[in-house]
Image (tube, rainbow, N blue to C red):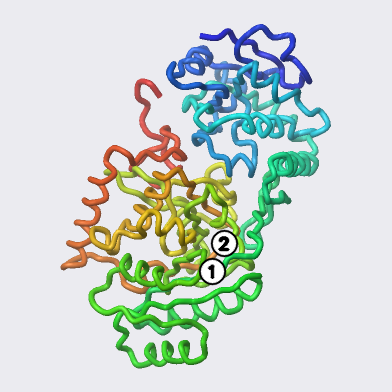
Amino acid sequence: MDELAVEPPDRVAPVGECSGGFVGFLKCGDRLSPDALFHAMSVPPDRPTKLIYADEDGFEAVSYGPWVHHSPKFKPDFDFDLLLSHDYLGNFLLVSAQLLAQAGPLASQLFGAERHDLVLRLIEQLDPAQIHHVPRVLYHCNAVRGASDLDVSEGDCAQSNSIRAVGAFFQRNGIAATAEPHADVLGRAHPTAVRTRWALPDPPPMVSIIIPTRDRKELLGPCIDSLGSALLGYPGQTEIIIVDNDTTEPDAKALLTHIAQTSRGRVLRFGGPFNWSAMNNFAAEQARGEVLIFLNNDTLALSEGWCTELASQASRPDVGAVGARLLYEDGSIQHAGVVTGLGRGLAGHEGVGQSVTDGGYLGRSLLQRGVAAVTGACLATRKAVFERVQGFDEVHLQVAFNDVDYCLKVRQVQLKVIYTPFATMYHYESKSRGIATEGEAKRRQDREEQCFQQRYKDRIDDPFYNPHFSRYDKPFTVLRPPRWGI
């Protein structure tokens, strides 16, 4: 094991004075757990690790005992997009001394964002496989000192300097993106976070919005109306493709005829039993767009620029699928990403029922970040990616888990899945088809659930879901019982 040198983080250039193979940072007044270095350096020898981070918590003295630990921060494995949003790696950081020497010293002029800037400079030289997350609380932050820091810190200055750090990262690496203050017209601004705005290709890609439907004029009509106004701000071409699955209601048929006659969208006919996967595959084959947005008919576009946000994210060469923030009719969150491996090896939505202004655990629902999967109720992907992974499984996953399966196939070809709160929609979940509780629909759902479990029984772990949390409760709400090794 390499030797370790621990240095205070306000030192500008400690590397030349260090003899250890790794350099660690420790703030004055904070503490490491007794076994911190053992666990941090117990990395499998076949992993070429050069940067290590871990979970942390706060501590403070109380009158009835020596110390109380609280406010744990249980972090995901390495997430590039979340790191752009804010320095979630936190206080515990061990860095290869050689790598740190190459990256250069802390930028003392970036008050409050020195570490964020340093980490961004470090990852420029790393492959993600060289970054290791230890899912244990190894670092204890002095909460009294932290509170004092907050009283005197210049929060606006720290955010501004993080924006400068992220912007400089983009410039150094020739990335077509800009960094700006985090803002959320529907939720709330995160006071220390950065919003990354990815540039569209030049020229902007054509976008095909695909909407499967049957009857339910009262859902499809408002959905189409909301798209009409929201698409005005998109600088490229767009088309709306409606896949009609044997509509019989007269009002709904009249609406489809009107849409086709007024060129508000193309209407494709798809007969037979409802098969969400087959309907979307059928439409994708005929779509003219380079970017496909699959959209349920029980959605309603809310945020301005949602199409630009989804298309720009989906156009990133290392991204394969993008999902929006979806809200219930009462304004609470219905979807802020999908967590896999819940329950008996299935999947579930993050943030369900939370206030859109709450932000959820560590502000996650407010931040653009990587996720294991997103829902097909609003899913953007490049057509080339869709064809590469052979679309949705219309044989075994006709209605359930097809979206999660698609995202897992995307990740298997080394592409990312991204959640963005900067595209937001209402989703009146299950209003179109209801929830299967009995009969053939329930039997089909059970079959598809079993198929999904069997297909991914050994590959379902979610790198963005910390193992401290229970897999049998709402994500990020309940801690699992302690076990040896965690």
What is the x, y in percent for residue 96?
A: 61, 18
Q: Amino acid at mark 1?
A: Val
Residue at far right of view: 109
**Looking at the image, is 173 positioned above or below residue 307?**
above
**Looking at the image, is 437 positioned above or below residue 70?**
below
- Residue 207, disc: 1
What is the x, y in percent for residue 121?
A: 68, 31
Q: CA distance from mark 1 to mark 2?
A: 7 Å
For disc 2, the neighbor class at 10 Å (few under 14, some 14 to 19, many from 20) is many
**Residue appearing at x 55%, y 9% in the figure:** 2
Q: Is residue 436 left or right of residue 320?
A: left
For disc 1, the neighbor class at 10 Å (few under 14, some 14 to 19, many from 20) is many
- Residue 311, disc: 2
Q: Is residue 191 left or right of residue 306?
A: right
What is the x, y in percent for residue 23?
A: 64, 15
Q: Which residue is at the front of the view, 178 or 109?
A: 178
Can you see residue 306? Answer: no
Are the two marked residues, 1 and 2, in contact with CB atoms closer than 8 angstroms?
Answer: yes
**Residue appearing at x 49%, y 82% in the figure:** 265
**Looking at the image, is 120 positioned above or below residue 472?**
above
Can you see residue 133? Answer: yes
Q: Secondary structure at mark 1?
A: strand
Q: Secondary structure at mark 2?
A: helix
**Residue appearing at x 35%, y 24% in the figure:** 483
Q: Is residue 234 left or right of residue 474?
A: right
Q: Amino acid at mark 2?
A: Ala
Residue 32, located in which quarter of the rendered image? Answer: top right
Q: Which residue is at the front of the view, 61 or 364?
A: 364
What is the x, y in percent for residue 459?
A: 32, 39
